[in-house]
Each structure stands twice: as C-alpha cells, then as structure tokens.
Image (tube, rainbow, N blue to C red):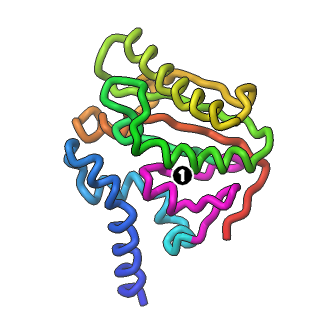
Amino acid sequence: MYSLCWIIFSGILLSGCHNMTHVHKKQDLTKGELAEHLRPYVNNPNYLFGKAELPGKVTYLALNKLGVTVIEQGNGIKFILPTDIFFYPNTDEITPKGFPAIDLLVKVFAATDNAPILITGHTDDIGNKYHKNTMAKKLAESIKSHLWMQEIEQKRIITYSAADREPISDNSLRGKALNRRVSIQLRVAHHDTK
C-alpha cells in the first residue's frame, strides 16, 4: 500500500511541477528543491487528488499548476507567487504567464466578501537597500493594481515591502530565485475544503 501511495504521490508531484520546472530551468532547480517548495501541498491528502478547494471553487491544484504555492495559516491563506514566473526580470510588469493565476486569485478574493488582503513584495539580497525596498513595493503595487482593475475593492488591499528581510531560502542562485516572490495573505473566518 505504501508503495502504491508513493507512486501516485510521485506522479502527481512531477506532473504538478512540470510548469514550475520549465520556468525555473535557468535557475537549475532540482526536483528535490521543488518538492520542498511544494511541501504545503503534499502534506494535504485532499490536494494529492486535486479536490481541495478554496473560496470561489478554485482548487489548490489549479493554482499550483500556474506556479502559485498555497499555505493555510489558521484563519488565513497565503499565496506565494515567484517573481521569476509572474514578472519580467528586474521589472514590476506582469508576464502573460502570470495573468491566469492572478485571475484565479480574483475569484478567491471575490468570494471572501470584505476579507483584508495583504500583498508583500520580496526581493533577493542583490542591490542597495533603497533599490530592494522600491522594487518590492512596486511588485506588490502591480498586483494590487491588477486586482483593483478586476473589481476587488482597493480599501481591502494593503501593500508592504519586505525587500530581502524575510528570505525563505539561502543566497545561492537557486535560493535567490525562491526568495524573489510576492506573498498575498488573505484573512478569512472559515473556508471549506472538499
């Protein structure tokens, strides 16, 4: 039974990582590093079968296939958007690959009434303090602008620049790629997973 579960898990993990592996090819991320990055998913048995749903009937699997990591935190949900997927290099301009995932997030946010949304921009450790803070703020504001254009109320959204102060990996080339991200925290009282 254990072997069968491992085979199913491996197949789903590899198929779910296909898009991320392709996008991160230039950073040469290993499958092990991707598995570590996706640990919040693989610890959720519902996720393995693609059935776990967020508000707005958006599945974890749909977001993951578009490069978004979903982490449940008590009464909130955090979405991690790697900037290497969602933005052109060294800019705050969203790539065509980024819009489908953001549009799914809009569905989640629209289904959570007036729940506050905190968007935080993160950079790697390259550059001076001013540059890192400015870039991180621009990344967060870019996502905010897109949400606002999709009719998510602006008063719900707070943006923040964490720059390089909250790394999730080391300062290797691969680690820097993981540290460059936008995190979106949504506070919800309750949501169902099926």
**Residue position marked by numbered label 1 in the rendering:** 70
Which residue is at 48% across, 34% downward? 182
In reply to whether residue 63 is colored magenta, the answer given is yes
Report the front residue among 164 and 82: 82
> How many other residues sit within 10 Å of disc 1, few (<14), some (14-19) or many (≥20)?
many
Which residues lie in the magenta part? 51-76
The answer to which image quadrant residue 60 occupies is bottom right
The answer to which image quadrant residue 163 occupies is top left
How many numbered circles are shown?
1
In reply to whether residue 49 is colored magenta, the answer given is no
> Considering the numbered disc 1 on the image, is that residue within a helix, a strand or a loop?
strand
Residue 107, x across and y down, in percent: 65, 49
Along the horizontal axis of the image, is 139 left or right of 185? Answer: left
Q: Quadrant of the N terminus?
A: bottom left
Residue 149, x across and y down, in percent: 63, 32
Which residue is at 57% across, 46% downward? 103
Along the horizontal axis of the image, is 51 left or right of 164? Answer: right
Q: Quadrant of the C terminus?
A: bottom right
Along the horizontal axis of the image, is 15 left or right of 63? Answer: left
Q: Which amino acid, by three-letter code, is at mark 1?
A: Val
Image: 88 above or below 104: above
Which residue is at 45% across, 16% downward? 133
The answer to which image quadrant residue 15 occupies is bottom left
